[in-house]
Image (tube, grey):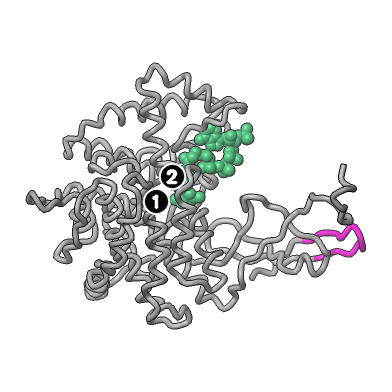
Amino acid sequence: MTDEHYSLIDPKSGRRLDFPVLETTLGPNVIDVTGLYGQCGVFTYDPGFGTTASCTSDVTFVDGEEGVLLYRGYPIEQLAEHSSFTEVAYLLLYGDLPTADQLRAFDYSLCTHTMINESLLRFFNGFHHNAHPMAMVSGVVASMSAFYHDTTDIHMPHDRDVFAHRIIAKLPTIAAAAYKHSKGQPFVYPLNSLDYCSNTLHMFFSVPSDDYEVDPVAAQALDLLFILHADHEQNCSTSTVRLAGSSGTNPYAAIAAGISALWGPAHGGANEAVINMLEDIGTANNIPKYIDRAKDGSDPFRLMGFGHRVYKNHDPRATIIRKMCHRLLERLRANDTPLFDLALKLEEVALKDDYFVEKNLYPNVDFYSGIIYRALGIPKSMFTVMFAIARCVGWVTHWREMVTDPGTRIGRPRQLYVGPDKRDYLALDERG
Ligand code: SDX
């Protein structure tokens, strides 16, 4: 708390009311308006929560103006360069980089949770072959609350830890099962001798009829994508997990709510929508037509993978992925170079257009990630599922921060009511 405050004059009473300023480590301070309604009988109004701090958090910091992203204070560029996904998961969950022993123990703990209950596997047979994988994954994750009663006392540190390790370890297994179901292929069990990302690729692409060797370049690329997608402060899906979790619901149900929120094309579903858009554009000479549509306020079309609620500069994650695309496409001998070249051209044209420059619309994390996932052989219907695997670490971290915060209350926003005034019931024969 600083001794600064903001004052307002209550127009009804003429009284001056002071609201304290809460000091941040980085970024903007906040005005504590928790006493506003009690003192003035009015609410604040901020649809989409663009200027509302919903909580106190020490997990991730995003500076949208400077294009900065820190996980527990560590710059995303340094973590992308030097770390691994499970090391970043430990950092986000426990607040500090692990020692070698701590990381070994964490990796081992995840390995002991990679398999899913055989009854959960049978759930997949209930889905039609063309069910969207996000629908399958959110449904199966929600049903985990029907299986794990032994460790969901959210007030017990041990239960919170087991839940965290269990859901982070099982999500790749569930994702791979959804993929195999959609392909009509047999489910592949996890192989705990493999690291997290190699195991994920093994469960996706191994088949009983052939030997399958995970390409270390592919595993490294997936690891980097997971690091970049692991957390992003109070984004839509993380806020959904916090809001659902604030009711005290089963933690698996809260994560399933986050998966559903991530699915939207305005959020994590954008990576799939970007590839659909690039395929629709087809060739560079069609770019101007799509740019014009994106600028036309009467056309609902938006340039997928562009723009961000917070980043009004380059999304540092997009910059890292773009740099990695070239190297990866070459090493994976993927034939997606034309799609990548089209994406680069689209970015070049858009960022020369005043509309995008004036509205600070830059490529976000979803603009290039789909090109890498395709190069890894992952179908676009699975792109948002891959995002969910990584973001599950952020969801669990914020869920735990919320349930252990003594100041947490059930989330219950108010509204600006613009409906009809009070009126009396009309009998049927009195209605016009
Ligand atoms: C993610 O929050 C997070 O941190 C999210 C995320 C994470 O890691 O969790 O970073 C992941 O969700 C990235 C975003 C992925 N979504 C997309 O790429 C979909 C395309 N982008 C847009 O839908 C949009 O930019 C949003 C949803 C991302 C942000 O929307 P905002 O902040 O509500 O901005 P806005 O809709 O108010 O747009 C401001 C203006 C509007 O024009 P005006 O009404 O002022 O005239 O910019 C325009 C918009 O029409 N605009 C776009 C545009 N994005 C915004 N115009 C064309 N194409 C776009 N992509």
Residue 385, given in percent of the width and then of the height, sits at 36, 51
Residue 3, given in percent of the width and then of the height, sits at 69, 69
Residues in magenta, as a range: 7-17
Circle 2: residue type: Gly
Front position in the image: 264 or 59: 264
Q: Secondary structure at mark 1?
A: helix
Give the residue at x 45% y 81%. 153
Give the residue at x 20% y 62%. 190
Q: Quadrant for the C terminus, please.
A: top right
Whether residue 312 appears in magenta in the rendering, the answer is no
Q: Quadrant for the N terminus, please.
A: bottom right
Q: Is the CB of the residue bearing disc 2 within 8 angstroms of ligand 1? A: yes
Q: Are marks 1 and 2 in contact (CB under 8 Å)?
A: yes
Rounded to the nearest angstrom, the CA distance separating label 1 from label 2 is: 10 Å
Whether residue 12 appears in magenta in the rendering, the answer is yes
Q: Secondary structure at mark 2?
A: loop
Kindly indicate the quadrant of the structure image that contains residue 20: bottom right
Return the residue at label 1. 134
Residue 119, given in percent of the width and then of the height, sits at 30, 67
Return the residue at label 2. 269
Q: Is residue 14 above or below residue 64?
A: below
Circle 1: residue type: Met
Kindly indicate the quadrant of the structure image that contains residue 392: bottom left
The answer to whether residue 67 shows anywhere in this view is: no
